[in-house]
Amino acid sequence: MVQVTRIVHRRANPGQERQYEQLVRDMLADCSRTPGYLFSTVIPPRVDGEEFHIVQCFTTQAALDTWRHSKESAEWHDRLKEVADKDPEYRVFNTSDLWFSATGLEGEKQPARWRMAVLTWMGIFPLASLAVAFLFPLLTDLPYIPRMMIVTALIVLAMYWIVMPRLLRWLGSWVKR
């Protein structure tokens, strides 16, 4: 299962920023009832005239597509056209591509580096321990460098696609403090 994150960029009409933000928040509350929805957040502009950024995370591309093609989504987008000057700009990412980015977490603040380091260690330590205990004995016939290449490649793959997305989901609130 590959989680996806969609980031939407859109500028509200001048003087209608509050109405736009409220409509977006109401739309995201409606979106949260979609099967496969994980979380979303609104990042308002830092200064007047800049774009809003909306982050939505779903369990799969199919779950995002269910929301995108729903009647409710179309109705919300029609309502948003009344307070926004242009169509939104969309970017969709494999969520695991964002694991060192605050974009993959709710909120605007970058995670503290030390917290990300601890989170990374929490994933690597058990993987490395298991590799040394169970994989190294199977690879004893190989020279040290090829053995390390295989083990580290497997650790990185497991971290990237399995461990880190789960750690961020489970400990994301701690990381963003």
Image (cartoon, rainbow, N blue to C red):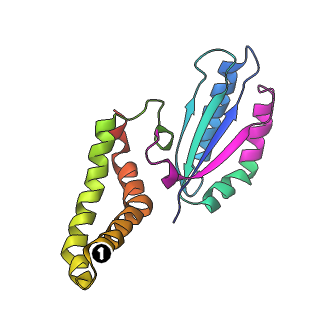
From this view, report whether residue 158 is shown above or below residue 170. below
How far across and how far down the image is residue 10, in percent? 71, 31
Instruction: Classify the position of the C terminus by image quarter.
Output: top left
Q: Is mark 1 on a helix, strand or loop?
A: helix
How far across and how far down the image is residue 62, in percent? 64, 62
Query: Is residue 115 among what the camera can see?
Result: yes
Residue 97: say if magenta: yes
Q: Is residue 41 left or right of residue 82?
A: left
How far across and how far down the image is residue 55, in percent? 58, 40
Residue 86: say if magenta: yes
Report the front residue among 17 and 113: 113
Query: Is residue 174 among what the camera can see?
Result: no
State which quadrant residue 176 falls in.
top left
From this view, report whether residue 53 is shown above or below residue 165. above
State which quadrant residue 87 falls in.
top right
From this view, report whether residue 91 is shown above or below residue 60. above
Q: Is residue 78 left or right of residue 46?
A: right
* Mark 1 Cα-neighbour bin, 10 Å: few <14, some 14–19, many ≥20: some
Report the front residue among 67 and 141: 141
The amino acid pointed to by label 1 is: Arg
Q: In this view, does 108 lie to the left or right of 91?
A: left
Name the residue tied to disc 1: 147
**Count of numbered tags:** 1
Extent of the magenta region? 73-101
How far across and how far down the image is residue 114, in percent? 28, 37
* Residue at the image point whose x is 22% and y is 83% from the top: 140
* Residue at the image point whose x is 33% and y is 74% from the top: 146
* Residue at the image point whose x is 28% and y is 82% from the top: 142
Q: In this view, does 28 lie to the left or right of 102?
A: right
Report the front residue among 142 and 107: 142
